Image: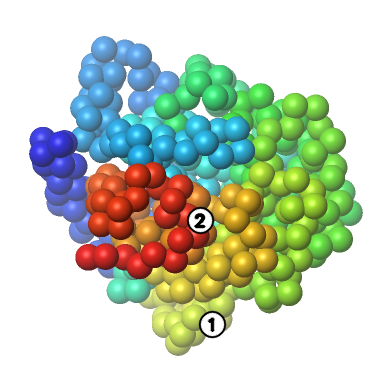
Amino acid sequence: MGEVQHGSRSTGSLYRRFVGPLLARDDGADAEQLSQLSLQALGQASLRRDWPLVSGALAGLGGKLQRHDPRLAQTLFGCRFANPVGLAAGFDKNGVAAGLWHLFGFGFAELGTITWHPQPGNPRPRLFRLVQERAALNRMGFNNVGAPAARRTLERQRLAPPGQRPAVLGINLGKSRITSLELAPDDYAASLELLAPLADYAVVNVSSPNTPGLRDLQDETLLRRLVERLRRLPACPPLLVKIAPDLEDDAIDAIARLAYEEGLAGVIAVNTSLNRLGLEDRRLPQTGRRLAEEAGGLSGAPIRHRALEVLRRLRATAGPALPLIGVGGIDSPAAAWERISAGASLVQVYTGWIYQGPELVPIILDKLGHQLDRHGLVHIGQAVGSALPWLP
């Protein structure tokens, strides 16, 4: 274990040395361009991961970042998760690196958001760093190649079938911008029907703030209609819904009830926030405007508290049986444990992972194991909803 930990630290030091300076300023290297360059390289590596030189380099990466602790493995909604830490949707929008995410230590990765129609998204710039706050503002607008092209991208990578992969792969689906709310169920259904054979699970994204009208689909009546349409599809994979942090308590309760009544596999809490959470007067150097004047969703450390509140509300209403995935402001082992202790069976990272680099995942996994030891637990499932504190 000592060598592996040292390898993780060396990977992290390289990231801090070469990528850290690019992330050190709000107006440094363009955030979206950095992500695209990274994904292009990862996409090429995923396509060529069986080539000797590429496979050797990838094996070295996995040796440094992966952890194999059976106490952290769980089976939820028919999927076996090697560990509870996943990559949130929004990074690998088109699934170009689907064959690689387990090598970064993830127990699962959520691809997308994918819509039926290809769409360019909102005008640039549309992704902004808030370095001091370890946060980001995005108004991407579901930019993606569309479900048919995404399926071809996934097929080219020759992935193992669902259930036989080293990391579980979820596919996050959204409504095409040009599709009306009335026709939204058919729009989602077309994407799901095409991509279902490649998905371990699927997510109904009705909570992005960057597609006009999308959040209206969180209304109990509209969401029930949408879910019922999708569940009628043949071979529908386990279906989850992703909700916004800005919902009122009664809306959260309604979604928890709907999830139970409609047999949803779980709920993901939460997406980005339209609330500026005390950062209303913070200015973006790229535009000169205050956050209160900017469109887009806030992610990262500032939404940690609200994401935790929503998760606790869901758990209290839904009871212990419904699997919950916690996301939003998870950038440390303590934050991951806090979410698990509050009722999340799984957690996802994104903004914190970008700021801290690849070593964040193995550090979280190592420290989760340490918390099990400190509390005298033998399996991570015992910690879910336990309300046990983080012990330093």
**Mark 2: amino acid:** Ala
Instruction: Residue 200: name its quadrant.
Output: top right
**Mark 1: amino acid:** Ala
Q: Distance between the residues labelled 1 and 2?
A: 31 Å
Residue wearing tag 2: 344
Q: Is residue 298 visible?
A: no
User: Which disc number belongs to residue 358?
Assistant: none
Taking 391 as reference, is 88 above or below it? above
Q: 349 or 176, which is in the foreground?
A: 349
**Crowd band around label 2 with a 10 angstrom C-alpha radius: few (<14), some (14–19), many (20+):** many
Q: Which residue is drawn at 26% across and 65% down?
A: 391
Taking 184 as reference, is 198 above or below it? above
Q: Can residue 116 be seen in this view?
A: yes
Q: Which residue is drawn at 81% across and 32% down?
A: 233
Q: Which residue is drawn at 31% across and 65% down?
A: 390
Taking 309 as reference, is 97 above or below it? above
Horizontal arrangement in the rendering, residue 137 relative to residue 375 (left or right): right
Q: Which residue is drawn at 70% across and 60% down?
A: 256
Q: Residue furthest right?
A: 182
Instruction: Residue 102: name its quadrant.
Output: top left
- Measuring from the top left, give residue 13's x and y in whole percent: 14, 49
Q: 104 or 148, which is in the foreground?
A: 104
Residue wearing tag 1: 292
Taking 165 as reference, is 284 above or below it? below
**Crowd band around label 1 with a 10 angstrom C-alpha radius: few (<14), some (14–19), many (20+):** some
Q: Is mark 1 on a helix, strand or loop?
A: helix
